[in-house]
Every structure is written in C-alpha cells, then in structure tokens.
Image (tube, rainbow, N blue to C red):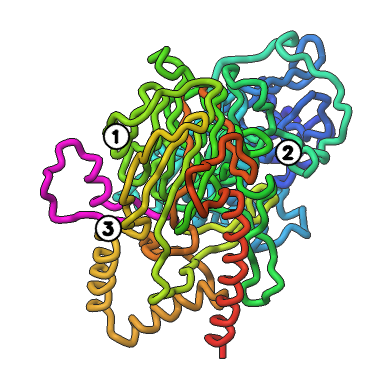
Amino acid sequence: MGDALWNETHTIQSKHKYCYCGRDRNLLQITLQCRSCRNWFHLECTTIASPPDLLFTTNYIFVCRNCNNSHVETYERTTAGWKEICATTIANLILEEIICRIGNENEELFESKNAALMQEWHPEQYYFNKKEIIPFVDKHWRSLCTERARTTTWWATLGSCLYSSKDTFIARDERQRSAASDFRLADPSLWHVRPTSQLSGKVPTSTSSSSTPRREKRNSSPQGDPKWRSNTPATNTPSPRSSSPVPFTPNTVPAVFPPGTANTDHPFNRFGFKYSPCEPSILPLVAYQQAENSLGGCTISIPDKSSYVSVTKDGLTVTTDKGFRMCRANVGVKEGNWFWEARIQTAAGASDSDGPHVRIGWARREACLNAPVGYDGYGYGYRDKTGDKVFCSRPEKYGEPFESGDVIGLFISLPPKSKEHFKSASRRRIPIAYKEHLWFEEKDYRPSKEMEALADPYRKEKEDYEPKILPGSYITVYKNGINQGVMFTDLIDFEDFGRLPESIMAKRAKKKRKLSKKEYTNNVQRKEDEFDGIGHQHWTEDPPVEDDGTLGYYPAISVFKGAVVTCNFGPQFQYPPLDQSDWKPLSQRYSDYMAEECMWDLLDEVSRSLRKK
C-alpha cells in the first residue's frame, strides 16, 4: 500500500485498501486513523480497550502496531473540545438524514470507492440548530464528552461554540449569525472527518495507554444496551426541548441522598416549559393522560425544582450546596384550608450567618426557582435566621427564628372560587418521550412586568397597576405546634397575570389586521385543531393566561448551602393545627387533583369528538 495515493485530507486512498486486512473503509463502520502512518483501521481489527462507540469520533490518538517499536497498539482518548463535540454530532445527524433518504440496505454505497456519491447526496444542504444538536449530545454524552464536566449551562456553551467557530460551522444566514442559527459543517463531506490529533504534535508512547485485548464484541456498545443506560446515573442539565437532568452528588450532600435518587431521568421545568409524567389513555382522542406520581401521592415535584436541589428517593427531603434554591410540591391549592409540615433537619437558624439556612412558605407557579421563597411577588416566605416574614424580598418582623430539630407547620386559607363563571381547564400539552419515559410538555406561566415591579425597591407608591387579591385569604405559621400568628393576609390572586392578557390580545389584533379575515379565522381554527390531535402540534410564543388546572399556591421550600428539610404532607402530623377548623392535609389535595384531571380528560374527549363531527 506504500505506492497508493491519498487525498489532501489523507482520508481516502486510491486503491481503497486500508487497515491490516486491506479491506475498504465504510462510513457505517467505526474506523481509527493512525497518528503516525495516517492509515485507517477497522475497529474490529484492533485490540484496543474502550474504543469509541460513536461514528466520526475525533478526540483520540491511535498508533497502530506497525508504527510502534513494541509492536503493540496504543490508544488514548483526549479531552473533548466543544468544537469536536459539535462537529461529531452534526456529522452523525447528516448521516442519519442521508440514510433516511437513500436507505442503508446497500452498504457498499458507503465505501470509499464510492466516495464520489457524497457530492450527489449534497451534505451541504443539511443544517441543524441547537434544538437538534443538544438532544443528541445529551443522549451520547459519555461517548462524546470525554473528561468534560457536565455543567448546568453546558448547552449555552455549546451554542456559543457554534456561533464563534466560523472556521468549522457555517450559518444558514451568516448576516444574522447567532447561537440560535441553523448550522452546517464548513467541510460537509463526511469522508473528510478525521481525528483532531492530526493537528497536534502529541504522540502516545507504548506506556501511555497500552492496549489489552477486547473482552466483548464492539457491537455491544453502551448505547445499544438499554440496561446499561438505565443503570447509569444521569448527569447535568437541559435543553429547551429535551432537558437533561442535573444529578446532585457533591461531597457536602448528606448520605440520605445516594446516587441515583429521584433526581435523574427527568426533564426540568425551564425555558418557559413545564413537564409532568403521562401515559396512554383509554380515551382515543385525548390519547394520553397524566400518570400517577411514581413516588406516591403528594411529594416534592421532581421536574418543578431548581436543578441544584437534590431530592431523596421518597421525594420528601431536599438539600443543596449552592445559594438559595427552591422546589415546590407537585400539587397546589386553589380554595379551602390546607396544612403541611416541614421538619428542619439541618439549619443554623440565628446562630450562624454563613451556615445552612432555610426559607419555607407558599408560592405560585411563576415564582423563581433559583431564589428563596418570598424573593418576588409570587411567594410568601418564613425565614429561619430571624423569624421574619418575607414578601418581594422585603423582610418584616414576624415570629421566632427556627433551626435544626424544629417542626414548622404551614396553614393556608383561600376563599371559595365563584361558581357563576365556571370554565373548564384550558390545557395545551404535547406528549414527548424523554429517557424512555413519556412526559407532557406544556407552556409554563411567565412572570409579568407588573408583578416583577412589586419587588422593585425603587417602585413608586402610586403605580397605575395594583394586583388583584383574594379577600379573606391568609397564611399562618406554627413552630413546634405554637401559633406564630397570621403571617400574611389578602394574598395576591393566583389568576392575576398582570397586563400579559392585554398585551397578547393587542399583538393578536395587530396580526389580524395584517391578515384577511378568512386567513386569520383559518389560522386560529388550525391551531385549535392541532391541540386536538388533528394536525402537527407546535407552540406559539405566547405564555398561558388561563388556568390549565395547575394554578394555585404550592408548598415551597428553599434551602441554602447544606440545609436539609423533610416535608410531611399528611395525613398524620406531629403538630396538627388544633386551633383551625375544616382544614385538610395537603396529601388529600393530590387525590382531588388527579380526579380533576380525569374530569378534564372526559370533557376534552367530548369536545374533540364534537369538533371532529
């Protein structure tokens, strides 16, 4: 093979004979390029341990036995750079598109002797954006991201790499290039993908990573083995459509939070979307229904928490090693009297200003998860250090401080909702598959500018907007069974969306003026049909401004630097509120909520049936 000619990138040989065996290369098979002779070797012809299990992997250094003085192959994976990660991902996505178009029954088409076909396949026409790239990276993290820590903002770093690496990635519209653009490879030919070690001077020696015979066939790769995936703890965070979880395993987390707790294999509520588990329904038009909580009844919501909060397997104990981070229960309340308890496992209270701290209370869906309860106008909190009550980040004197060992009871009373203008829940949700489970994806509620202004310390006293309240509503807190008094009264109505409804209607009216009446009517009807399962489902930019069945006030816990809190949602309490009447444990609210979901499913089934007729 010494007289064979190579192309400029040294990836295609004129005689199409490669490896020890002299066979041709194939794009559908993993091959390795030798750092010294630059020949290509079939994976099955090598004896290296832990080889790559993904096509177009480039972050490695391989030396064949012909080029090594000890006649032993050496192989070393190098730290994966974001440019290499993105290039490998896009190359695999391009191959998927080509296979989808021409099929892979005739594998000979993908051999190097037919490399000219690449021009006919036009790989330059395939562009991909973050919404397609991030899920692939998330799924193949272990194969792609060698020695790379999965941070909470890795997806943002990936987007920045795509934007800044103009030598490797070309945007569909270079004039408006951004991290959100569609990108393709600058050199789109898949035959030209080669290891990054060719650009470096590093050559491994026979002692750097001496190879050993493989004990298994390479076709049993980690990605092809579902058992391997399910037993592997997932690591860090998400994307807009496919959010990868952030498991929390720092050394500071107590032993009650073992690896593989309820923090893995689920999406997080973020980027304006929320998630809830679902399953197939017996109702043909509804098709899917909300699934029962796998942890059992009322617990901390695993998707609806900061990615830095860790939760135990039973879904009741939480902690973090970061600054204040918050989580909510999986059900909220809309009316009536409700009670739950929080046992403070670890909190410094008034004794240590820098130690672990806790704030607990009640919060709406719009409350920020990366801040303490009471940070904004969407929550009411009780502070361990001073016993202050907190709303809109403004502490006021209230009760006694609390610390480790204390049991805090939280009681809320909400007036009954008016039945005169009854309206069914306005639900818009799409079932998606994530980590081998089904989830409903829904648009989440967005904080309004008017509500955010309430927390502005420079806000003028006489603003032209005042939020609606729930007359007669109040929150009372108990410390070890002792009533600390009413903490807040006349809570803000959880159906107050500020001026969001008016701004959305104004935007729609503007759009309507630009379209003819017939076009607008058809457009509105089409969007309604899409969420009835008739058409292709997609999202609009507008946040929900109607109750989808999840509005209300939720038990909320925020923890700070090692604080640990265990929730008790009932029905048995250590210190029940004996001075209150007609109250219910929050555990009962979960049963009521699931019954409501069944009722809304039936109503949706009837509505869709009538509409189809």
Sequence-first tag of 3 and 2: 2
Real-space CA distance between mark 1 and mark 3, rounded to the nearest whole angstrom: 20 Å
Q: In this picture, is 31 found above or below 507?
A: above
Determine whether, in the image, residue 536 is placed left or right of residue 553.
right
Q: What's the amino acid at mark 3?
A: Lys
Q: In this picture, is 557 found above or below 530?
A: above
| Label 1 sits on residue | 393
- Closer to the eye: label 3 or 2: 3
Res. 9 visible in picture: no
The residue carrying pointer 1 sits among few (fewer than 14), some (14 to 19) or many (20 or more) residues within 10 Å by Cα, namely: many
Q: Is residue 184 magenta?
A: no
Name the image quarter holding the N terminus.
Answer: top right
Magenta segment's dominant SS is loop
Q: Is residue 467 magenta?
A: yes
Identity of the residue drawn at 21% across and 39% down: 456
Identity of the residue drawn at 72% across and 34% down: 232
The one nearer the camera, 560 or 287, is 560
Sequence-first tag of 1 and 2: 2
Sequence-first tag of 1 and 3: 1
Q: Position of residue 13 (x, y in %)?
A: 68, 38
Identity of the residue drawn at 31% across and 45% down: 377
Q: Which mark is residue 468?
A: 3
What range of the chain is rendered magenta? 444-469
The one nearer the camera, 152 or 207, is 152
